[in-house]
Image: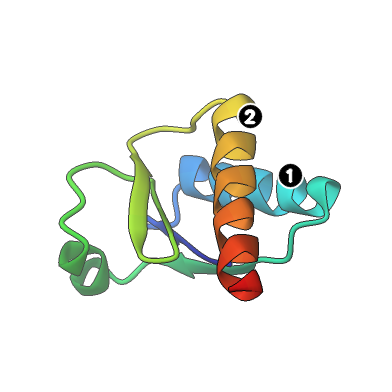
């Protein structure tokens, strides 16, 4: 699963990336996390507020640090979708 945390590298951006890594590890979900800080690249995602999260090309969040429950929901939903695609 490809995850991008988009933002300038502020405290919220770092906290969000760390939470995603921690929760993925706890759930045993393999991720490739990229921290995108280049504003010209972030602009290509049409993000209005940061930090933003993009999972497998789909923006799932923008602005602030979401709840742990939301992060777990994104990870498990994306993992189920990826597993389903691999089985086909």
Q: Secondary structure at mark 1?
A: helix
- Residue 18: x %, y % from top left: 66, 50
Q: Position of 53 compared to 85: left or right? A: left
Q: Secondary structure at mark 2?
A: helix
Q: Is residue 20 above or below residue 68?
A: below
- Residue 67: x %, y % from top left: 56, 25
Q: Specify the farthest residue to the front.
A: 88
Label 1 neighbour load within 10 Å: few <14, some 14-19, many 20+: some
Residue positioned 70% across, 54% down in the render:
21
Of 81 and 74, the residue lying toward us: 81
Label 2 neighbour load within 10 Å: few <14, some 14-19, many 20+: few
Q: How many marks?
A: 2
Residue positioned 66% across, 43% down in the render:
19
- Which corner quadrant holds the C terminus? bottom right
Asked if labels 2 and 1 touch by Cβ distance under 8 angstroms, the answer is: yes
- Which corner quadrant holds the N terminus? bottom right
| Residue that numbered label 1 is attached to | 23
Q: Position of 52 compared to 82: left or right? A: left
Residue 85 is tagged as none
Of 59 and 19, the residue lying toward us: 59
Q: Is residue 76 above or below residue 78?
A: above
- Residue 54: x %, y % from top left: 40, 57
- Residue 52: x %, y % from top left: 36, 48
Q: Quadrant of residue 73?
A: top right
Residue positioned 49% across, 30% down in the render:
66
| Residue that numbered label 2 is attached to | 68
Q: Is residue 88 above or below residue 59?
A: below
Q: Position of 53 compared to 21: left or right? A: left
Say whether disc 1 or disc 2 marks the residue closer to the N-terminus. Answer: 1
Q: CA distance from mark 1 to mark 2?
A: 8 Å
């Amino acid at each position: 699963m490809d995850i991008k945390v988009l933002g300038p590298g502020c405290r919220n951006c770092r906290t969000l990336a760390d939470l995603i890594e921690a929760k993925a590890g706890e759930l045993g979900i393999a991720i490739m996390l990229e921290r995108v800080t280049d504003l010209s690249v972030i602009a290509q995602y049409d993000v209005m507020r940061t930090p933003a999260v993009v999972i497998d090309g789909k923006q799932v969040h923008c602005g602030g640090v979401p709840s742990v429950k939301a992060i777990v929901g994104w990870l498990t939903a994306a993992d189920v979708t990826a597993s389903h695609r691999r089985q086909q």
